[in-house]
Amino acid sequence: MRSLFEIDTKDYDINGTITVRPSARGIIIKDGLLAMIYSKKYDYYKFPGGGIDKGEEKEEALKREVLEETGLTVIPESIVEFGMVHRIQKGDYEDVFIQDNYYYLCDVLDGITQQKLDEYEVDEGFTLEYVTPEQVVATNTESKLKEVDGIMLEREIKVINILKNECIL
């Protein structure tokens, strides 16, 4: 998979404890709108997806995470690699947190099932919304989460800009 960009905060102790947590994220476009997860608590958008479990294939994680967070079912034959974002920074509990975020273009079946959210996702009020790329950029630029995890917001904005530059959006 091609590398889209790297985010390296250089705020970590490379000789300390390291946690590696790859993720798979879905880029779902319908009628020019993006299927995004919206956090009511922090007022931001993110691409649906999350951590890849040990021994799990990336595409299996993509389907599982999209279904859990959105209630949407990914059509396996529609999955196309888009690119990877490498993120390295000081972690909340570890000295170094490394995450390779694998982004996939994909389509979903019509209809929505119930979300299966983790406790923190329920706390944040995760909901599925179809929004314009401009709405995502504007919301994430002003989000209350900037002070907590501005890197994730920056990542999503950069991915959207690449999608726009490549005429996918």
Image: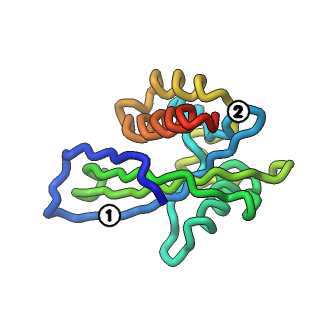
State left or right for residue 54 relative to residue 80: left
State left or right for residue 43 relative to residue 33: left
Q: Position of residue 77 (x, y in %)?
A: 74, 63
The residue nearer to you, when weighing 138 against 42, is: 138
Mark 1 or mark 2, whichever is nearer to me: 2
Above or below, 125 against 52 in this view is above
Q: Position of residue 26 (x, y in %)?
A: 62, 51
Q: Which mark is residue 19?
A: 1
| Residue type at tag 1 | Thr
- Residue 116 visible in the current orientation: no
Figure quadrant of residue 39: top right
Task: Look at 19% across and 45% down and name the residue there.
Answer: 11
State left or right for residue 40 relative to residue 102: right
- Extreme-bottom residue of the structure: 55
| Residue type at tag 2 | Leu
Above or below, 155 against 116 in this view is above
Residue with the mark numbered 2: 33
Task: Look at 68% across and 45% down and name the residue there.
Answer: 28
